[in-house]
Amino acid sequence: MDYLKQIAAWVFLVGFLFKYNYLSVVIYQVPLMAGLVVKNLILFLFLYLFILPLCENRKIRNLVFCFLMMVTFFCLSNIWYNRYFGNYLSLSDMVMGQGARPVKVIARQLFRAQDLLFVMDLFLIYLFMMRDRVSIPLNTIWAGCVTRQKTIAGAVLVCLLAVQILVTNHVLGNQTPMALFSRSTSAFVNVYGIVPLYFFEYYSFFHPYEQKIPGIAPPSEKDVRVDKKMMKKKTGIHDIIVIQVESLDQKIIDYRHNGREITPFLNRLKKNALYFDNFYAQHVNGSFDAEFSFLTSIYPINKNYGFRVNDLSAFTSLVDILNRKGYTTLAFHGNDKAFFHRHKAFSELGFDRFYSLEDYSFHDTVMDVEKTVFGINDHDFFLQSINHLKSADSPFFAFFITVTSHTPYDFYPREYGKGRFEDIKNPLTRDYFRSISFVDKSLEMFFKHLAALDLVDNTLFVIYADHDSGVEGEEYSAKRSFVLNKPVKPPENIPLFIVHPDIKPGVFSKEATPADLAPTILGMLGEKQKPEEFFGKSLLQKDDTPVLFVHEIPQILYKGQLFALMPMGIEKIGYVKDQGDRDMILPMDQDLSDTITYIQAMMVDRRSDSF
């Protein structure tokens, strides 16, 4: 090779190994560095001895360059997905997700300037090698490659790879490949690598690993009785309205920009609500995780699109319980009924009626907002839903899911945005403030109509978010500050309002997630115990218990301290900055591990035959 081709060859080696190691360490979080170092040596020698010499042929150069482009695309896709969900981009996400993130979302929300580092090698290789039209015949190159020395080198690399697999697997538990895949993606990648991971995931679709379900041991007490100190008197709940707001940050509540409130209605509502500022989203695969977690009181797991793949009629749901209590159960969403397979899920969960896009009119809209992939805007969604509530038999349980404040946050009337927050330079922040302000106005209008129908005084209102906005900029950042010693996405802080005239208002800092809402509602309805399979706990009791986030690397939050279930066991990985670092031992660590194992096995066991 000439001088420039040698530079290009080294750029290829460094670029490929940089991407492979970034994925392994940051995205897949391999626990054993020694195994990764050995794998790096094997990859380097294989590429250097057997692939680079072939690049003297122009067709092979083109193939290798295309391969590196694919690796780069795969790497960036994983990085952007990880920034949004905190997991690696699995085959399940590719097949079962709702399509790729729009270019506008990637450009405005997920892209970082440092991402350009991942494409610099492509530019340099093209500059130094790909424009060279000189090509040596492949048979000539091949004759120089098939030598005794390289045959021996190839055999040594195969033996070294086998030793690396055996030793690394022994250190990480000495399990079969399928058992290791089911137990820990990090450990699997550490032993076998990234490409085999996707082959095993494909195989697991059709041959799921039969993981033995341990005896159920809920992580909190079954008792859901309400602490009387939190009540003015015994509640007289008649109807129940729960609103899941898209991308509502806890930080946006009471937040002011240049003295101007973003959510004035919710700020006023907070004064009359039991408000939780330590409430965190269940956002593992998508927004539907929040709904699944709320309605079943179970923690969703990664790589499991529950609304599509699980037989949800096999789960105990809040909807079924309320049906048996004589409630009319209604779900409302302004998007297509099949989006995230909600039509299947809500039917299996027991809802009497699901109002979706086909039940709303674009001819009677008050707000001039163009129809988008999100359906109808929140103002007209709430306004037209009033008519559906009027015809509902009482008592009713009405579950609303909003859409206007969905990323990229431009689904609001154009005239509404004029003159609002125009001084904000970051377009993502500016549009988020406008869209969430529009949602706040829509909620205020909804409550006024409910009051006119006398549907406020005896109604229990619960308002929370599916996840935070993900907005991070100089003017505003949605994230709660965590101090971390591992590159993980920390829990997303969202608000929770519980409103009823008989509940004492105030700010409560108990750590909780949507999995705790169903037990809380049951307690307020006078139930003494929750169902056996409800893993959440009542929020109207004093005890603090750890909360789970079953990502690919499960996280556990307890008293502001963040832990992770790593292949080698539970270890502390950070803490909430304003709560400080505490030297504590996580209580019930074995019970928590068993709970995670139980939920993972249960979700596989209850897969639908038709997905």
Image: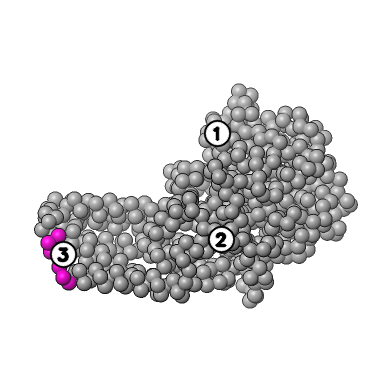
Task: Tell me, for residue 414, which label it has, or none.
Answer: 1
Q: Determine the residue positioned at 82% across, 55% down.
A: 528
Q: Is residue 23 left or right of residue 325?
A: left
Residue 22 appears left or right of 314: left
Crowd tier of the residue under label 1, counting other residues whose Cα lies within 10 Å: few below 14, some 14–19, many 20 or above:
few
Q: CA distance from mark 2 to mark 3?
A: 46 Å
The secondary structure making up most of the magenta span is helix
Kindly report the distance in space between the C-alpha atoms of the residues bearing marks 1 and 2: 53 Å
The single residue placed furthest to the top in the displayed view is 363
Query: What is the crowding at mark 3: few (fewer than 14 residues within 10 Å), some, or many (at least 20)?
Result: few
Stretch in magenta:
142-149
Q: Is residue 559 left or right of residue 48?
A: right
**Residue for badge 3:** 146
Residues tagged 2 and 3 counted as in contact (Cβ below 8 A):
no
Q: Indicate which label's residue lies in the foreground, 1 or 2.
A: 2
Residue visible at 76% across and 46% down in the picture: 321
The answer for how far apart the CA atoms under marks 3 and 1 are is: 67 Å
- In the displayed structure image, the side of residue 601 where residue 228 appears, left or right: right
User: Residue beneath label 2, please?
Assistant: 211
In the rendered structure, which disc, 1 or 2, sits on the residue that comes first in sequence?
2
Which residue is nearer to you in this view: 398 or 138?
A: 138
Answer with mark 3 or mark 1, whichever residue precedes in sequence: 3
Q: Residue furthest right?
A: 233
